[in-house]
Image (cartoon, rainbow, N blue to C red):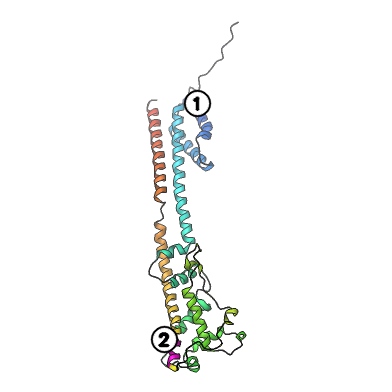
Amino acid sequence: MTPQRSKRTGGPKTAAGKVSSSKNSFKHGLTTLGFADGIEAQEAKSFIDELVAYYKPQSPLESLQIQRIALCKAKLVKLYSVEQAAQDLALLNLQGNPAVVLKRIEGFSFVSKRIALSMLRGEKSVLPLGLSEKRLKEIKQEIDGVRNLLGDEPALRLALKQTVRFLETLWEESDGDEFSADRYLSWAVKKIEDFFNEQSSKSSKQEPFEEMLAKVHLPDEVRSLPKVSVRKQFGPESFHDSICTDLTRFTQLWSDFNAAKKLVERFHETQALMVKAITPSPEESDRLMRYQTSIERRLSSAIGELLALQARR
């Protein structure tokens, strides 16, 4: 008895049946397209749904070209997101490291950059000895108004009341002596000079002005005050000249402080320009460009073949 041969339909015959059947290749083909991650695969699936709805493929070859188009499009979207992510990371690094921006700005002293960095970081004390802007300004204005000879301690206290009042805030009984404007001025100026001259260690990986913080007075530092005046005693004129030399440290500090405020303004302008100029390195740009060109060529080829197949229906 001759066995009956199974009846085969040969696949769908209607246009609707062919469209439904063509989707099977997409369902199984998605796992073999080599997506970088689930997001990229989902992106391709979305493109496939759009292309199938529009082109209504009626053969495996048309389905294959739609897969290729969707894959290339998903890869391009991923590439663009990678480029944007690189720019976003560079932007975050720029915003989180003000020293990088300050390094690019010229025409400001080391001390001004140091003070500006403290301002940008929102530090409470940006000046040495715990000086505030208001107190430093008062001292500077008072120094500018000095007209009489500062020949001894009483003359110093009489002519520089604001300065002496500030020095008195640093005074502590622990040094065992009475307050001396002369000695405290010498000590305060030494701390300001340390602030001017301090350098980071050679082994440091940070910028010098990024490391340094404004010094405030500590009890153990106050105890190191000289017990007697350190000025050469050659008469009132010599004493006056020595005091004036010390006072110039305060005026220089005021000048650096004001320059720092201008530097902060320049910082924001420069940062904005640096943000606009954020680009990948030449090597990275070349690699991304070659990758993009390769994908676009594959995309163009797949689109052309799909259109040619549909034209031959």
Q: Amino acid at mark 2?
A: Asp
Mark number for residue 101?
A: none
Please identify, in this view, whether the residue under mark 2 or under mark 1 is nearer the observer: 2
Please state the horizontal and vertical placement of residue 293, each as a whole percent of the image. Answer: 39, 41
The main secondary structure of the magenta stretch is: helix
The secondary structure type at the circle numbered 1 is helix
Work out whether 51 lies above or below 257: above
Magenta-span inclusion, residue 104:
no
Q: Residues within 10 Å of mark 1 (few under 14, many from 20)?
A: few
Q: Are marks 2 and 1 in contact (CB under 8 Å)?
A: no
Residue placed under numbered mark 1 in the picture: 17
**Which residue occupies the foreground of this view, 295 or 196?**
196
State left or right for residue 210 relative to residue 302: right
Please state the horizontal and vertical placement of residue 43, each as a whole percent of the image. Answer: 49, 41
- Point 43% across, 91% down: residue: 238
The secondary structure type at the circle numbered 2 is helix
Q: Magenta residues? A: 237-242
If you read the primary sequence from the N terminus, does the residue marked by circle 2 or circle 1 appear first?
1
**Which residue occupies the foreground of this view, 278 or 195?**
195
Please state the horizontal and vertical placement of residue 182, each as a whole percent of the image. Answer: 51, 88
**Which residue occupies the foreground of this view, 93 or 22?**
93
**Which residue occupies the foreground of this view, 11 or 158?**
158
Q: Residues within 10 Å of mark 2 (few under 14, many from 20)?
A: few
Q: Amino acid at mark 1?
A: Gly
Q: CA distance from mark 2 to mark 1?
A: 96 Å
Please state the horizontal and vertical placement of residue 130, each as a whole percent of the image. Answer: 53, 78
Image quadrant holding the N terminus, namely top right
Work out whether 305 lies above or below 278: above
Work out whether 292 lies above or below 133: above
Magenta-span inclusion, residue 239:
yes
Mark number for residue 144?
A: 2
State left or right for residue 173 relative to residue 310: right
